[in-house]
Image (cartoon, rainbow, N blue to C red):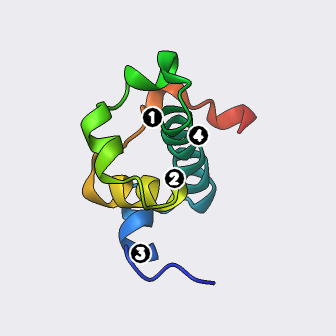
Amino acid sequence: MSIIEPKVDVLLNHADNDRFLLCAMASKRAHDINDMMHGQRERAIQLQTAVEIARAADAKPLSIAFGEIAQGDVSYDPSSIDAMNH
């Protein structure tokens, strides 16, 4: 199994070419999407609208997360990363 769309190069551009950061971003976002899809909305609703979750009901949470990263809808705060203890 491989990622076809979005391209890995595009995804890495949104994560400062750090594949571990990309995995962390996608994992966290996919977790939030999964929470929304399964009714655990408290944390997730603050991050995403229910309308967008409804349109993506057929897609897997990780695929949705990668798509959002490629579109620039998901990002991270570089100051929140402790590079010394990373």
Measure the alpha-carbon separation of dots 3 and 2. Answer: 20 Å
Q: Is residue 30 left or right of residue 77?
A: right
Measure the alpha-carbon separation of dots 1 and 2. Answer: 24 Å
Measure the alpha-carbon separation of dots 1 and 4. Answer: 21 Å
Measure the alpha-carbon separation of dots 4 and 2. Answer: 7 Å
Task: Say which mark, if any, is on residue 61.
Answer: 2
Measure the alpha-carbon separation of dots 3 and 4. Answer: 23 Å
- The answer to whether 22 is drawn above or below residue 34 in the figure is below
Residue 13 occupies quadrant: bottom left
Mark 4, Cα crowd under 10 Å, few <14 / some 14-19 / many 20+, is: some
Are the residues tagged 4 and 2 within 8 Å (C-beta)? yes
Where's the C terminus, which quadrant? Answer: top right
Which percent across, then down, holds residue 4?
44, 83
N-terminal label among 3 and 2: 3
Residue 15 visible in rendering = no
Task: Say which mark, if any, is on residue 9.
Answer: 3
Residue type of the residue flagged with mark 1:
Pro
Mark 1, Cα crowd under 10 Å, few <14 / some 14-19 / many 20+, is: few
Q: Is residue 34 left or right of residue 78?
A: right
- Give me the residue at 55% from left, 41% from top: 34
- Element class at badge 2: helix
N-terminal label among 1 and 2: 2
Residue type of the residue flagged with mark 3:
Asp
Which percent across, then down, holds residue 53?
35, 42
- The answer to whether 6 is drawn above or below residue 57 in the figure is below
- Of the pair 76 and 39, the residue shown nearer to us: 39
The residue mark sitting in front, 1 or 2, is: 2
- Of the pair 2 and 38, the residue shown nearer to us: 38
Residue type of the residue flagged with mark 2:
Pro
